[in-house]
Image: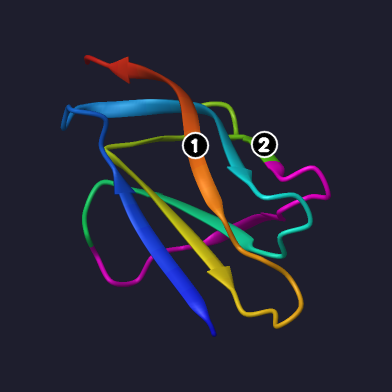
Amino acid sequence: ISVDIEMVIHLDTLLQKDWKRIRLVFNPRCQAQVHVATQDTFDADKRWNTISNSSDNGKVEYWFKDGERSTFLFVRLTESSANALFNFYGLEIEYDVNKN
């Protein structure tokens, strides 16, 4: 069974955010791919950045490029292996709100 999950993260404000870091937690040995895109709109043409396969310990951590800003953070999880479980437990995000 193929899984394709896309999340839109705005963090309770429509102001631009200066994205710092994202950490996701899966079950160990999950083979999910993690992709992120930062945009100010809901355009269909997102520039997905593949940040990682989930690791042996189930944790994925990504530090955004310095100065990467947008209103929305899109997170996409894809998984299609037949030989591994897929459990997504949650994520945490570090950011600063750009009030200018």
Specify the quadrant that holds the N terminus: bottom right
Q: Relative to residue 48, is residue 67 depicted above or below?
A: above
Q: Give the range drawn in magenta.
A: 43-59
The answer to whether residue 91 is left or right of residue 12 is right
Q: Position of residue 63 (x, y in %)?
A: 63, 32
Q: Where is residue 74 in the image (x, y as percent from the top left)?
A: 38, 52
The amino acid sitting under disc 2 is: Glu
Q: Nearer the viewer, residue 23 or 68?
A: 23
User: Which type of secondary structure does the marked residue at label 2 adopt?
Assistant: strand
The numbered mark at residue 61 is 2
Q: Which of 36 and 92 is in front in this view?
A: 92
Q: Magenta segment, principal secondary structure?
A: loop
The answer to whether residue 88 is left or right of residue 38 is right
The amino acid sitting under disc 1 is: Leu
According to the image, label 1 marks what residue? 91
Q: Position of residue 59 (x, y in %)?
A: 70, 40
Q: Where is residue 47 in the image (x, y as percent from the top left)?
A: 46, 63
Hey, which residue is sitting farthest right in the picture?
56
| Residue 99: in magenta span | no
The residue under the point 71% across, 60% down is 30
